[in-house]
Amino acid sequence: MPKMKTKRAAAKRFKITGTGKVMRMRHARNHNRLKKAPRVRRSFDKMAPVHPSDVHRVKPLLPYAW
């Protein structure tokens, strides 16, 4: 059986933590950033967990990350 391929677009957007949680970057972090409050701008630097109902969509895209 051939090796499974990792979807490179997903590999750039999602990271898997040591405990197995799928993390994503927050939206709206590049455009019109100066209009936003500093507290909001700092929150864009942190990763957010993917909702549990969406994890099953991400898992097949990253076969070797688990």
Image (tube, rainbow, N blue to C red):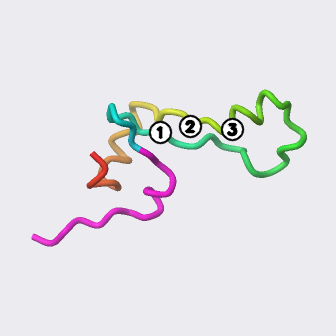
User: Going by the image, does 56 lie left or right of 1?
Assistant: right
Are there few (<14), some (14-19), or many (20+) residues within 10 Å of tag 3?
some
Label 1–label 2 contact, CB within 8 A: yes
As helix, strand or loop, the secondary structure at mark 2 comes to strand
Q: Residue furthest left?
A: 1
**Closest to the observer: 7 or 18?**
18
Which residues are the magenta region? 1-15
Query: Which residue is painted at 39% across and 33% down in the image?
Result: 53
Label 3–label 1 contact, CB within 8 A: no
Report which residue position mark 3 lands on. 44
As helix, strand or loop, the secondary structure at mark 1 comes to strand
Q: Determine the CA span between mark 3 and mark 1.
A: 13 Å
Task: Please count the marks in the image.
Answer: 3
- The residue type indicated by label 1 comes to Met
Q: Residue furthest front?
A: 18
Report the disc number at residue 23.
Answer: 1
Of the image marks 1 and 2, the number of the one nearer the N terminus: 1
Placement of 33 over or under 1, stated as above or below: above
Query: Which residue is painted at 27% across and 45% down in the image?
Result: 66
- Residue 42 magenta: no
- The residue type indicated by label 2 comes to Met
Report which residue position mark 2 lands on. 47
Q: Determine the CA span between mark 1 and mark 2.
A: 6 Å
Q: For residue 8, what is the image quadrant?
A: bottom left
Label 3–label 2 contact, CB within 8 A: no
Q: Position of residue 48 (x, y in %)?
A: 54, 34
Are there few (<14), some (14-19), or many (20+) residues within 10 Å of tag 1?
some
- The residue type indicated by label 3 comes to Phe
- Residue 8 magenta: yes
